[in-house]
Amino acid sequence: MKKITLNKKTKIISVSLLFLVVLAVVIIICVNGLKEEEKPLSTYNMKLSYDDENHVLSGEEEITFINNYDNMFTCLYLHLYPNAFREGAKNDLVSVADSDEVYVDGVSYGNIEIKGVSSEGENLNYNIEGEDSNILKVELPVEVYPDESITFSVEFATTLANVNHRLGYGNNAINFGNFYPVICMYEEGVGFKTDLYHSNGDPFYSEVASYQVEIAYPAKYTLASSGSLQLTTEEEGVATSKVSGDKIRDFCFVLSDIFDSVSQKVGSTTLTYYGYEGDSLSSALEISVKALNTFNELFGKYPYSTLNIVKTNFLHGGMEYPNLVMISDNLEDDEIAYVIVHEIAHQWWYGVVGNDEYNHAWMDEGLTEYSTLLFFEEHEEYNVDTASLVKNATESYKTFVRVYTSVNGEVDTSMDRPLNKFDTQPEYVQCTYTKGMLMFDSIRKSVGDRKFFKALKDYYQDFAYKNASPADMIASFIDSTRVDLEGFFNSWLSGDVVIK
């Protein structure tokens, strides 16, 4: 065999090539192989029983809290949203103008009662705190350090008010939204977020978690829920359903004895529309299917196996929950399609990509409103002129500014503020939905379609199952478009932009 002798120049080239090959391999491994390890999720295991006669949901809730933060905890704080429905609550559920529509049978109240908190058979100390009895503080039996976990149980009873709202019973259905104690979000350097329930917007902010829920209810009812239904059994007039949900931000369910439903498979997702007996269900199912397909294409794949569109008694047009959206039964026929599309878009913007809806409502509402426009842009068969939508939104916003200025002498047009800083519902709507839609339309026109739609996909992928801050969204759009949009965003959010 001939021996190969390398001269000095050949050795240098060989070493250099070897270095480049090794460097390339390391880069590939870092990018593709060594992705950030997925952290385990906290879990909620609930056993629920609904007393139809007294309108009380009794629950045993076992929570395993996993400390994915950098701090040690000696106590945890949980939201008690049902106490916003109690007599004497600090904030009104709805505006005075909406009272007759929400309290159709007269003023009614509900609440949540905490019957005990324990861990491993030992009772834990707890207090009802907050400005409006809206927070459950649980003293932990041990210090919980980063990457450690603790399991504790909460026994509670939620009494429903007779209201057409997220939580309450009406003439056609019973809504169970935000009915259970849920751990408050914790922000490094800030602490637990314990904001009050508010009539403006959706005052919610939570981490994704895993849910295992067992629900006992009168067998005359049909159940629609978050998560995926695993099994329903019936005994002596009581149905018991077992539901599981993985990586979902919340859990909600609706009961009705007049539900009729129709389903269709969309990829790996079973989409079901729940209407009332006698409804024509096909058109609602059709637009729901189209919305799911369209947003799968525009933003990224919907990651869950179920999506339920549920008609129910609800004051506002609709309400989003993981795997389930409420659609108000008081909508006019020409409003239904728009609301269905809007609420399905929330499965991406709030459901998968979360944000602090109390302090930064524009992030999900503005982007969802613009996503609704994008759907109708893709589907001309619905005869919705999207250029007119933008024009009408612009005129609506300008009218709002003009009227508020004439009445009050000035108007706050900033978008990035807490719900309690919007004096009226119209002000909230104009500054989050309307102005939010106009802002995203303006960004699209500034950077072009290719960069804009890439930014939406990247934002969805980068923050799936996380909570994004305004800074996160802005940085994500800058990274995707390679355009410095920080000043652009900030001028809209602060109210400096003048819309003509």
Image: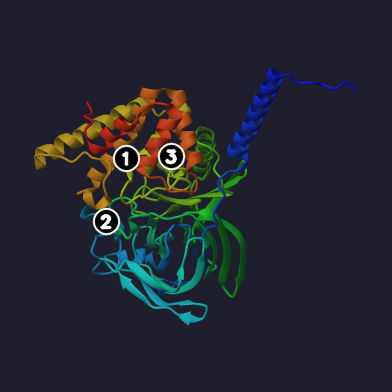
Q: Amino acid at mark 3?
A: Ala
Q: CA distance from mark 3 to mark 2?
A: 25 Å
Badges 3 and 2: C-beta atoms under 8 Å apart?
no
Nearest the viewer among 163 and 12 is 12
Let me know if residue 322 appears in the view. Answer: yes
State which tag comes first along the sequence, 3 or 1: 3
Please identify the quarter of the rendering in which residue 129 is found: bottom left
Nearest to viewer (mark 3 / mark 2): 2
Q: Quadrant of the N terminus?
A: top right
In the picture of the structure, the residue carrying the numbered disc 2 is 94
Nearest to viewer (mark 3 / mark 1): 1
- Element marked by disc 1: helix
Nearest the viewer among 448 and 69 is 69
Q: CA distance from mark 3 to mark 1?
A: 17 Å
| Image location of residue 360, percent across then percent down | 32, 46
Relative to residue 38, is residue 117 drawn left or right? left
Say few, some or many: other residues with alpha carbon within 10 Å of mark 2 (under 14 / 14 to 19 / 20 or more): some
In the picture of the structure, the residue carrying the numbered disc 1 is 433
User: How has the structure been colored for display?
Assistant: rainbow
